[in-house]
Every structure is written in structure tokens, then in C-alpha cells.
Image: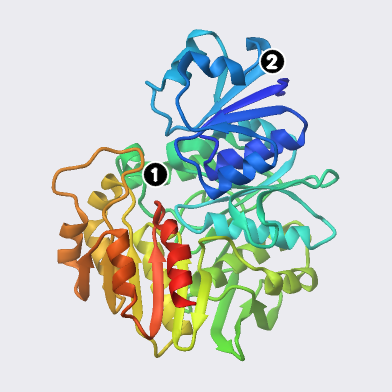
Amino acid sequence: MKLNYSNIYFIGIGGIGMSALARFFNLKGMQVAGYDKTETLLTKQLVREGINIHYSDFGSDVNQFVNDVSSTLVVITPAVPADMKELQFLKENGFTIKKRAEVLGIITANFKTLAVAGTHGKTTTSTLLAHVLSSTTEKCNAFLGGISANFNSNLLVTPNSPWMVVEADEYDRSFHQLRPFSSIITSTDADHLDIYKSKEALVQAFEEYGNLIDPLGKLILHHSVGVCENIPSLTYGVSAEINTDYKGSNLRMENGQFLMDVETPTQLFKNVVLGLPGIHNAENALSVIALCESIGVGMEEIQPALESFKGVKRRFELVAQKDKLIYIDDYAHHPTAITILIDSVRLIYKDLPIHVVFQPHLFSRTQDFMAEFATSLSKADDVILLPIYPAREEPIEGVTSEVLSGMISVKSQVLSPNDALLALQNVDQGVILTVGAGNIDLLVEPISNMLS
């Protein structure tokens, strides 16, 4: 299927996945416009790139942003409410409307797609994969789920490369629209239970996704992922107790660098330098090494790229540092990811206390994992909770940050964003972590300014 449209209109254009598509079509010379609920740094950048964006539901007046029915494609996300007036008008008037995942599937069908799936870790891993491949003779294109610090974008276009790197999103079963050549699966922890209802249904969706890869391709699986046993796969991990095809060991900080030893099926590479520290980043790197080797890229090209990787905005991002006070911002919004984050900080900053500011994301996720969130957050030295970020949801009775706070075993309090800022002024040493997937990123600049 081809997308033969001259005009592309996005509802929810400010989303990270939607904005990458908008940039792609804009680069192709199509007329691109869109709506989003709020103005952000990302939407401002899209406007600077020549994309027309508005922030009010124009209803039937959306006509001024679209061409005739035959030449216009409307792209939406699953989060768009069905009663949105613009969407209703476009439906009633016969416009072609496709979900973001379907459009991504159509575009990537023209490439040898390398996809990264998983309930957490996929944005950093896919961005690292794109960075490594772009540093080699293979090169690549990429649609990313975050802003790469190396590319300063979530889109990478290289016209002569056959490879396309994408993030395979399990939400709403979006990843079933893809047909990858090969894929990494980082994790299948229970999540999005508002969609899947049970972990078993989620794992089954990953099983179905894994079976979509090309017969000549490979599945690269974290050692905890138990899907697709009938498909040729390679496993990876840093756990000494687990037998994997790609193993990381001896993780350590030396002279300001984060290193590990890497054992592949054929060789041992000592003192591999990673641009980003942390246990999760070591595992992400192992998965990228495995996938790159499976398509013929050798460690002599991979290693320098691992060292020069600068990361992704809001993924273990070192924002500020002053004397014995370090500030890191991270997108973690699942208990497993928070546990790995805090464990990684302990590994790197052994003797410093950890102060976490966490904004729970979604009432349903907080309800599903209340006990697990309490356990993971209790690994910090003290915790500030912000009110739950609702995103697309209505409140659920009895599901509040106050209830979660009462279950945390270390010092914990619930504060507004402004009061959290005031409380952080009393922190004179340690690691401050802002954690969450909502609008907690609005605190990043004020905290950074406060420290400097």
C-alpha cells in the first residue's frame, strides 16, 4: 500500500511518535498541519520547521487546514477522544483516517525494519541501535520514541540505506502493524492492563508480534522474555546466574567512564566503554551488539559508537551536577524500570543518598501496581510524590498518591510541583531523581536553575 496524499493532518501532533511522522512527511515536501491540546517545546520546534499547529478544537473549521478528501490523510493516536469535534467532522465528511501505527507500518514496509519492542527500555535501545548503525557503513533511517541527543531529533532519514529502526509500541497492540526483519524484545512485564486485562494477554500479544519477523531475521530476547521458542533467537543479559548468548559482566565506573566486559558467542571483549552508565544501559548495549552482529556489523565498528552515544532526552539524563549534588531526569513509569534506575544510581554513586521525586502516570497503572511501586520507591532514601498524572483517564476512587505514600517504607510525602521545588532547596548532597512519564518534565528547568 502507498500513501498517495499531498496533505497530511495530525490530531495529537505533539506526541513523540506523531511528531516524527509529521517531520517525515514535511521533509518529503507534503503540506503538514495538526492539532494538539497543549503547546510544548516539541510543537514549537515543529512550527519552526514549517508545520502549522493549533491548540483549539476547531470543529468544522478544520477545513482551513485540510485539502479535499482525495488528497488528505488524517493521522490520529489511540488517545484521541471519539467525541472530538474535528475528528467527528472529518469522519462525517469521508476523510481517510488512519492510526499512527498503521501509517508507520505502511512506511516501514518499504525498508528492512529493525524494531525494538518491550514494556520498558525500547526508546533508549532503539536510539542506541540507530546511533550505532548510523556510525557504520550500513547507515539507517529511524523513527524514534524520544529526542536523540546525538541527532537532536526523533527522525533520521538516510536515502540510500535499506535499514529502518523503529520502536514497536505494544500499547493498543500497535506493534502488530509492523513486519520487522529482526527485532529486540527488552521486556514483557505486565503493563497497559487497561488494554490487555491480564499479563497473559500481554505476553500473548508479544508472542504474536515475534512471529511477524522475517524468516531470515533474528529475535534478540532479554533473558527474562519467554516468547517465540520456535523462532531462531539470541539471548542477552548481565545476570551471572543466567546462561545467555550475549553476556555483560564486571560493570564498573573507572576514571569517569562506565565499562563492562562483553562475552559474545565467539569472543570476549574486555573494557567496553558505554556512553551511558547504568545496568539497564549495559543490557540495552548487549541487545544492540547482538542485533548488529546478526546483520554483519562487527565489534570494531560497534564499540566506538557505544562510547560516543549521548543518550535520549529524559532517559537517565544527567541534567546538572554541583559538588556532591547530582540531578538526573528519567522517564521511568513502571516499577521494574524504577527499580533498575535506583539500582543503577546506587552502582554509580555508591555513597550518596538518593532523593526521588515521582509522578505516578495513569490511575489504572497506579492501581494495578500500587504495592510494586511502593517496593521500588522504598529503595530510595526519601521520596516526594506528585499527584497522579491522569493523561487519558478519569480518577479511580481510592487510587491516590497519598495512598501510595502510606505504603512506602522510607520517608515519603505528597507535594504539589511548586512545593516539591521548595522542598528540594533543602537538599545539599546526594542524587536528585525526577521520575515519571507525565508532565514532571516541567520541573527539569526550574530544578536545574536552582542547582546552578
Q: For the residue marked with disc 2, what is the amino acid?
A: Ser
Question: Residue 313, position in %: x, y?
Answer: 56, 60
Type of colouring: rainbow
Q: Secondary structure at mark 1?
A: helix
Q: Secondary structure at mark 2?
A: helix
Left or right relative to 151: residue 62:
left
Q: Which residue is rendered at x = 39% and y = 87% of the image? A: 352
Q: Is residue 374 above or below residue 349?
A: above
Residue 179 seen from this side: no
Q: Earlier in the sequence, mark 1 or mark 2?
A: 2
Q: Is residue 325 above or below residue 147?
A: below
Q: Is residue 26 above or below residue 152?
A: above
Q: Is residue 156 above or below residue 378?
A: above
Q: Which residue is rendered at x = 48% and y = 79% of the image? A: 240
Q: Residues within 10 Å of mark 2 (few under 14, many from 20)?
A: some
**Quadrant of residue 273 within the rendered picture:** bottom right
Q: For the residue marked with disc 1, what is the amino acid?
A: Leu
> On residue 71, which mark appears?
2
